[in-house]
Amino acid sequence: MRIRKNIAVSDEGFLFNPATGDSFSTNGIGSEIISLLKQDKSTSEIIEEISKNYDVDRLLLERDLDEFTGLLKDYSILE
Amino acid sequence: MKKQIVIAVTALNAIDSPGPGVAVIRAIRDCKDFDVKIIGLSYEALEPGLYMHDLVDRTYQIPYPSGGTDSLYARLMYIHEQEKLDLIIPNFDAELYNFIKLRDKLKELGIRTFLPELNQFEARDKMKLFEFGQKHGFLVPEDKILHELRELKKMEDDLEYPIVVKGKFYDAVIARSYDQAEKAFLKIMAKWGLPIIMQEFVKGTEINIAALGDGEGNAISIIPMRKLYITDKGKAWAGITLEDDKLVELARKFIETTKWRGGCELEVMLTDDGKPYIMEVNPRFPAWIYLTAGAGQNQPASLVKMAMGEKVEPFKTYEVGKIFIRYAWDLITDIKEFQLISGNGEL
């Protein structure tokens, strides 16, 4: 999973797709996940990293991450 | 001291379906390479641009395009005597034919234009666009030209619903059945006359591209834009510049193929699988042309330079993600001004 290289991402988690003109804003955790995706982290690495910093049920995290990355794919943010 | 160029510009209406004139003037005035005097050419006394004195120095009414070239030429001769015009930039589809026809006579008077040839202008006409696409390898939706209502039934043999019902100059309605198509046919016929164009419906994202050609096959500037906010008339009220090499290449190929001279706007439907269909080609700058100046490729100013004989190199970059947001503004004027333009035809 990689963020498309033309996608502009601000530190605040605001995404802009210059090919379609679409823009999106995410909440804090979404912004963190995008930042990890930008560092080419794998799904398991992202889960590790988030689990380390937050008190979260692992299964729930996996499910939410799957849903979130699915959305990013639908919006052509992820390759 | 820079030489002053006297430029006449049409399409000064700036209502909810605005003409490009005010945006063209704004872009020209942004360019500091020349000093300009702007002469507005208007059709109606209430075109807002007439009263924008910081943009338009003086305005003259001109006859409607239906009046033909003789009356237009006579009026332009008079205006030229008063103002010594260097260049005219017409911006309405319906008036372009007359201005192209008058191009050589205007040149004799010392008035320049920067317009497409008549054959270029006619090849991209809505009624010939499909043929044009087939000839030059552009994706264009299939269409049928109907000259009377009874041809509508027969059209169903060739096109499937939904279809787009279009007027020869303006208006487009999506019809999903015979009844809807008939209703749209009659409504558009009443407003714009015959023929009516029935066009295959293409689903996708609408993209507009403003392009400027030098008349020798070179695209001087290409800016793709996606509408972010659309009025009930389908006009962009906000839009954003895009980065898409396919779209830029499409416009470049169009300019190369046609050897287009001047500004134009390609209306493109980009399908979900990435195929760009040309829906329409407008033979002049679009109303959102000021965005090209905002994005770093001032197309109207480049047109002025080329029209005045300057060699302009193609732009290489533009800013992606530049947004325009249109707004309405209540301009206050006096009855005396209105009286001057409506009574004397000059302001």
Image: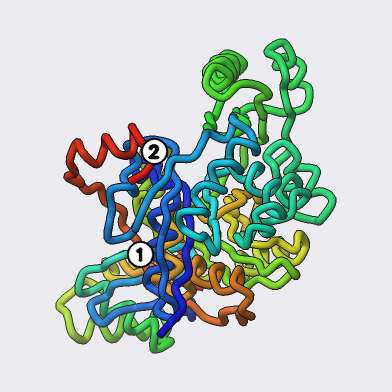
Query: Of all residues shown, which one is farthest toward the front?
Result: B81
Is any part of residue B319 visible from this angle?
Answer: no
| Residue B196 in which image quadrant | top right
Q: Is residue B90 above or below residue B215?
A: above
Taking the image as shown, residue B64 lies to the left or right of residue B68, namely left
Q: Work out whether residue A7 or residue B267 is closer to the camera in this orientation and state it.
A: B267
| Residue A40 in which image quadrant | bottom left
How far is the residue under mark 1 from the one under mark 2?
Answer: 37 Å
* Callouts 1 and 2 in the same chain: yes
Q: Residue B126, how many percent across, how many down? A: 68, 39
Q: Residue A49, how many percent across, how many down? A: 28, 86
Is any part of residue B303 visible from this angle?
Answer: yes
Q: Residue at x 69, y 52 (%)?
A: B105
Circle 1 is placed at which residue position? B323
Taking the image as shown, residue A71 lies to the left or right of residue B263, namely left
Q: Chain of mark 1?
A: B
Q: Work out whether residue B6 or residue B199 is closer to the camera in this orientation and state it.
A: B6
Q: Residue B291, how many percent across, how many down? A: 41, 64
Q: Residue at x 44, y 59 (%)?
A: B24
Instruction: Say which amino acid is labelled 1.
Output: Ile
Taking the image as shown, residue B247 lies to the left or right of residue B327, namely right
Q: Is residue B112 above or below residue A48?
A: above
Q: Residue A55, how many percent across, how many down? A: 15, 77
Instruction: Say which amino acid is labelled 2.
Output: Gly
Name the disc covering residue B343, or none: none
Give the SS element for disc 1.
Answer: strand
Q: Chain of mark 2?
A: B
Q: Work out whether residue B219 or residue B205 is closer to the camera in this orientation and state it.
A: B219
Circle 2 is placed at which residue position? B345
Q: Residue at x 57, y 13 (%)?
A: B179
